[in-house]
Amino acid sequence: MIARRKFIQQSSFALAGTLLTSQTFASLIKATAASDQINIAAIGINGMGWTDTVNLLRQQSVNLVALCDVDANVLAKRMKELASLNIDASKVKTYDNYKKLLEQKDIDAVIIGTPDHWHALIMADACAAGKHVYVEKPCGNSIGECDTMIKAQQKSNSIVQVGQWQRSQQHFKNAVDFIATGQLGNIRTVKVWCYQGWMKPKPVVPDSAVPPGIDYKQWLGPSQIRNFNASRFHFDFRWFWDYAGGLMTDWGVHLLDYGLLGMKASYPKTIAALGGKFAYPDYAEETPDTLTALYEFDGFNLVWDHAMGIDNGSYGRDHGIAYIGNNGTLILNRNGWEVIEERQSKHKVVKPLEKVMDEGV
């Protein structure tokens, strides 16, 4: 078991210079004795930030001591839900400003589940405050933001993990291990796609007064100052360049990650993209609801394809990664993976089929 003081003292040794690792943050939490708890806080709890918090609280060694959100309505809702988690709400402090939360001395680690445009700044501030961090994906909205985050982690030696939870799923690892055997032959194309029929932007509505309980100035943070608009707020921030990058930086972060990981690829040589508002031209969104991007690497091409509003993606799947080789094609997604043999190939391959019954979130 790792005592709380060892968790804090040895963190720099465990993860110096590391921004993204598989299960690092979670494994250290699990290794801590229940009698020597780690105090956590969550910043941004309307969506995945709350899901991450609830999942982490399943570990007996974890103690929730603070919550922060710029929407008092969300904060009140989560505080009421603490009873169902057997947590005494009177022992959990609440904040509407994350900087005040970071001043709380007994917090060991924070979860950041804010809209994307806040990830880099809060993560850097949390590291400077001596906190360990689990930050939701995407880690940053630009290369510059990501570079800043890496420097902040290296300067502080905090444990920092990005929410690439598919890195922790065994069947994804098994598929990558199969690719490494070389049985697929020369892989010349990787197709990555995401078709999401349930995703739909909001209609165009006029600007309005800020609803009660919301600190809208704090919500905007480092982004451009704009009047409040309900169709740009909460979940729908995803479809506006001020805050995010659309479906590619939402689901695509997970899927493209494995496209690159399976190929052990680094930076592409060239990138070209075409897309637009083809599905919902009259709705309130800026990012393309339909997009195709082509990445050129040495020895293979990677194609990204996304579409909102429809589910009929490649190979009859609404999302996935296909590694297309001379001997066969491996198709991987959250439900499992399989290999389709190339009929004309003289090199036969094993055709494993791995199905996953319990999908992740």
Image (cartoon, helix red, strand yellow):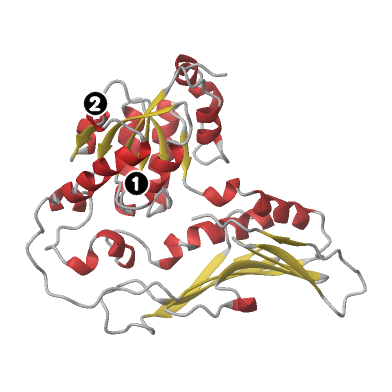
Rendered position, 243 above or below 12: below
Q: Tag 2's secondary structure?
A: loop
Image quadrant for the N terminus? top right
At a point 14% along the width and 51% down the height, the residue shown is 214
Q: CA distance from mark 1 to mark 2?
A: 18 Å
Q: Position of residue 313 (x, y in %)?
A: 56, 78
Rendered position, 155 above or below 139: above
Q: Position of residue 263 (x, y in %)?
A: 68, 57
Residue that numbered label 1 is attached to = 119
Q: Badge 1: how crowded within 10 Å, few (<14), some, or many (20+)?
A: many
Left-right relation of 69 to 309: left
**Residue type at tag 2:** Glu
**Residue type at tag 1:** His
Left-right relation of 7 to 130: right
Q: Quadrant of residue 299?
A: bottom right
Tell me if I can see residue 262 in this picture. Answer: yes
**Residue, far right:** 346
Q: Quadrant of residue 282?
A: bottom left
**Residue, far left:** 209
Frontmost of labels 1 and 2 is 2
Q: Tag 1's secondary structure?
A: helix
At a point 41% along the width and 35% down the height, the residue shown is 133
Tell me if I can see residue 16 in this picture. Answer: no
Q: Position of residue 346 (x, y in %)?
A: 93, 74
Q: Earlier in the sequence, mark 1 or mark 2?
A: 2
Residue that numbered label 2 is attached to = 103
Left-right relation of 222 to 350: left
Rendered position, 93 above or below 323: above
Q: Position of residue 325 (x, y in %)?
A: 77, 69
